[in-house]
Amino acid sequence: MTANKTVTTDLYLRVQQFYARQMHAQDSGRHDDYADTFTEDGVFAFGPGLEPAVGRETIRALLTDNSVVGGDDPIQVRHWFNQLVLEPRDDGAFDSRFYALVVNTRPGSTPEFVTSAFVHDVLLIDDDGILMRSRTLSPDHLA
């Protein structure tokens, strides 16, 4: 994929739409759709001291193995992304940095704040779409 070097309003909105679709997939347990947002050799680093998941299939397997959606626990996980900054890189990709909040909700209970984090993604963007080369999570409570 080759990237447009300019961050236009249209590009910014495309990235926002990409993240909305990505998080809808993750929060509804569509792990295949979520994993498919990464490049084949994508890297998902969960935080300091944790081994990153490398490769789309490894990411898919990890999400499936650790899924909290479904089963006997009727938990609903929601991810919110905000304060997105998108910047072109010299290699043609884009740095995407934003804040993330995660909330769990169970029927009849008050939503539970789980974590906040700083997220750094490297995105490959072209006319065909957007793919994530890497995602690095930096949970605030581990800073």
Image: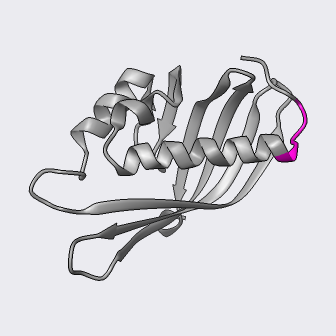
Q: What residue range appears in magenta?
A: 5-9
On the image, which quarter does residue 99 sit in? Answer: bottom right
In magenta segment, residue 17: no
Q: Position of residue 41 (x, y in %)?
A: 51, 19
* Main SS, magenta residues: loop
Residue under the image location 55 percent in, 49 percent down: 20
Q: Quadrant of the C terminus?
A: bottom right
Q: Is residue 80 above or below residue 95?
A: below
52 left or right, relative to 10: left
In magenta segment, residue 6: yes
Q: Position of residue 64 (x, y in %)?
A: 26, 37
Q: Position of residue 50 (x, y in %)?
A: 40, 44
Q: Is residue 102 above or below residue 62?
A: below
Q: Position of residue 8 (x, y in %)?
A: 88, 43
* Of residues 26 and 128, the one drawn nearer to the viewer in this rendering: 128
- Res. 51 in view: yes
The residue sitting at the left extreme is 72
Residue under the image location 22 percent in, 38 percent down: 65
Q: Is residue 104 above or below residue 93?
A: below
